[in-house]
C-alpha cells in the first residue's frame, strides 16, 4: 500500500539569515519564505527534507540565557522553553507557507527526537522521519535547543542536522541556501578581488582554510568555515553539496532541479 | 551538575473538551487554558508530564480527511500536514500560557518520536523526554497524527500516550481532567439516579462495563469507556489514576497536590 523509500532524498538547508531579518529580533522575512515555498513547490522534488536555521528567532534568545554554554543555573530552564517556543513559531510560519503551496510539510522537532553529548548529536530517532519520506511528506527540521547528556542542554545547529541526516538517509545531494553566492577566495564584501569558487574538493577546501578563516562572511553558528566543517562528514561520505544564494530568486529552484546555477559545489 | 530523576512523575491529561470549544472548529477555550496553567503553577509539582487532547483542533480536521481510516489515497497526505499543523497551534497556546505562568514547558511532539502499528504505539523515543524531566522541564505532549507502519498514518489519542508514558516513566499517578465529574453509574446528563463512583478497582470496572456502555458521556476518542480502556494497562501496572472535572476550578490543583477532591479514583 505504501511504497518503499526508493529515491534518495535531497536534504536542503535554508539559512536563518535568508528566512528572518537577522537585525530585528523575532522578525521573519515573510516575502522570502513565500518565494522559497513557491520555488520548492515548482521544483517538485520527489523525496525532500528541509532544515532551517533560527536567525533572529533562535540565536538572540538563546544568547540572552547563555544556552550555548550549557546548563549553569536554573534560570536558564525558562530560557530553554522560551527559545524553543520561538523556534517553533518560526517553523510554523515556514510549514504553513509550504502547506499553502500544496507541499505536505510536517514539522519534525529536533528537541523531541535528539539528545546531544557536548553539543554533538549522540542519538537521533529517525524512524518517524524515514516513514514520512516513504509517505512523500516533506519533513521540516530546524536548529533547535536540545537536551545534552553532558551539558544539560545545547544548541544544535541546522548545519549539524543537515550533515547527520544526509549521511543517515544516504542523500542524493545537499543544497545549502545562504545569503551569499557561495564560497569566495576572500571576503566579497570588502575585497573586490575575491572571486567565487564554483567547484572545490575536500582537499582543495583544506588548502583554502587559511584564506577562509580571514573571511568576514560569518553567521552566528560559526560562519562559512563552520558550515564547511559541518558539511565535511557528508561530503566524505560521497554526498555532493551545493551552496547557493537563497536570497536570489530561482537559485534554490535550480539547485533542487539539478540545473546549472551560480554557487559552490563541494565534492569528495 | 544535573540531578538524576529521583521523583516519580505525575502524568496529567487535559481533555480536548476542556481546553477547546468542541462545538466550534479550531477554537481554544483561552480562559480555561489560563486558569489551568495557574492551577498547575500553584500546585508546583516536582516532575510533571502533560498530555492534552485535540478537541476542535484535532478531530474535525482529521475526520475531514478520513485520517482515522489510515492511508487510502494521496489527498490525505495534505490532510495529515494540515491536521498536525492545527494540533501544534493548539499546543503553542498551551505551552505559551504555561511559560507565562513561569512553568518551563517544552512541547514534545508525538509525530516526531512515535511510530504506531495499526494505531497502537510501536516505538516511542523517550530519551529526550526523560532527560527533560531530569532537568525539571515540563514536557507537553498531545494527541497527534502519527505515521503508522501498517496503515501509513494513524490518530494517536492523548489517552494512549498517557498510559504508555505512565508505564515507561513508572509514574506516581495519573490525573485525567475531563468535562464531567468522573465515572458515573449511569449518564448524569439524562439519568437523575446516576451517581458518581468515587473509587473503583479494575475488577469493579469490569463489572460496570455493561452500565458504562450505555452512557452518553462520550468524547471523540471513544468516550469514558475508551478512556478507561486506555488507562487499564497503567493501572494494572500499579499506577493509580484519578479522573476529575477540569472545567471546575481547583479540581486539577487538588488532584495534582494529592488532596481530597471530587472525582473517580481507579486502582488495581
Image: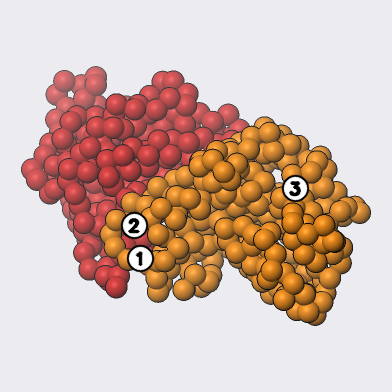
Chain colours: A orange, B red
Residue name at image x 38 percent, y 24 percent: B21
The disc label shown at residue A246, or none? 3
Are labels 1 and 2 on one chain? yes
Tell whether label 2 touches label 1 (CB within 8 Å).
yes
Query: Toward which corner of the image does residue B177 lie, by quadrant?
Result: top left
Q: Which residue is mark 1?
A: A71
**Mark 2 Cα shell of 10 Å, populated few (<14), some (14-19), many (≥20):** some
Give the camera-side residue of B170 and A97. Answer: A97
Q: Which mark is residue B229?
A: none
Q: CA distance from mark 1 to mark 3?
A: 35 Å
Q: Residue sitting at 24 percent across and 26 percent down?
A: B187
What chain does mark 1 sit on?
Answer: A
Q: Earlier in the sequence, mark 1 or mark 3?
A: 1
Question: Which residue is label 2 attached to?
Answer: A76
Q: Residues within 10 Å of mark 1 (few under 14, many from 20)?
A: many
Residue at mark 1 to residue at mark 2: CA–CA distance: 7 Å
The location of residue B96, given as percent across then percent down, is 37, 39
Closer to the camera, A1 or B91? B91
The structure residue drawn at horizontal position 28% and vertical position 47%, both measured from the top left corner, is B103
Mark 1 falls on what kind of element?
loop
Q: Quadrant of the C terminus of chain A?
A: bottom right
In the displayed structure, A170 sits above or below B63; it is below
Label 2 SS: helix
The Cα atoms of the two marked residues, 2 and 3, are separated by 34 Å
* Mark 3 neighbour class, 10 Å CA radius: few under 14, some 14 to 19, many 20 or more: many
Amino acid at each position: 500500500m505504501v511504497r518503499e523509500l526508493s529515491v534518495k532524498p535531497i536534504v536542503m538547508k535554508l539559512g536563518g539569515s535568508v528566512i528572518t531579518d537577522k537585525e530585528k529580533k523575532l522578525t521573519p522575512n515573510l516575502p522570502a519564505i513565500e518565494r522559497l515555498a513557491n520555488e520548492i513547490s515548482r521544483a517538485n522534488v520527489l523525496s525532500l527534507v528541509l532544515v532551517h536555521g533560527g536567525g533572529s528567532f533562535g540565536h538572540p534568545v538563546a544568547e540572552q540565557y547563555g544556552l550555548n554554554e550549557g546548563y549553569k543555573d536554573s534560570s536558564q530552564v525558562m530560557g530553554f522553553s522560551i527559545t524553543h517556543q520561538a523556534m517553533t513559531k518560526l517553523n510554523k510560519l515556514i510549514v504553513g507557507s509550504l502547506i499553502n503551496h500544496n507541499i505536505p510539510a510536517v514539522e519534525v522537532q529536533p528537541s523531541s527526537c535528539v539528545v546531544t553529548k557536548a553539543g554533538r548529536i549522540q542519538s537521533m530517532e529517525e524512524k518517524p522521519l524515514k516513514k514520512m519520506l516513504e509517505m512523500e511528506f516533506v519533513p521540516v527540521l530546524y536548529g533547535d535547543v536540545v537536551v545534552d547528556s553532558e551539558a544539560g542542554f545545547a544548541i544544535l545547529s541546522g548545519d549539524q542536522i543537515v550533515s547527520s541526516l544526509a549521511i543517515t538517509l544516504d542523500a542524493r545531494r545537499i543544497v545549502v541556501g545562504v545569503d551569499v553566492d557561495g564560497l569566495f577566495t576572500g571576503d566579497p564584501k570588502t575585497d573586490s578581488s575575491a572571486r567565487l569558487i564554483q567547484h572545490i574538493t575536500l582537499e582543495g577546501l583544506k588548502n583554502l582554510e587559511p584564506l577562509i578563516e580571514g573571511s568576514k562572511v560569518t553567521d552566528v553558528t560559526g560562519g562559512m568555515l563552520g558550515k564547511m566543517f559541518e558539511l565535511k562528514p557528508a561530503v566524505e561520505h560521497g554526498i555532493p553539496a551545493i551552496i547557493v544564494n537563497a536570497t536570489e530568486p530561482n537559485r534554490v529552484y535550480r539547485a533542487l532541479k539539478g540545473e546549472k546555477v551560480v554557487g559552490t559545489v563541494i565534492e569528495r
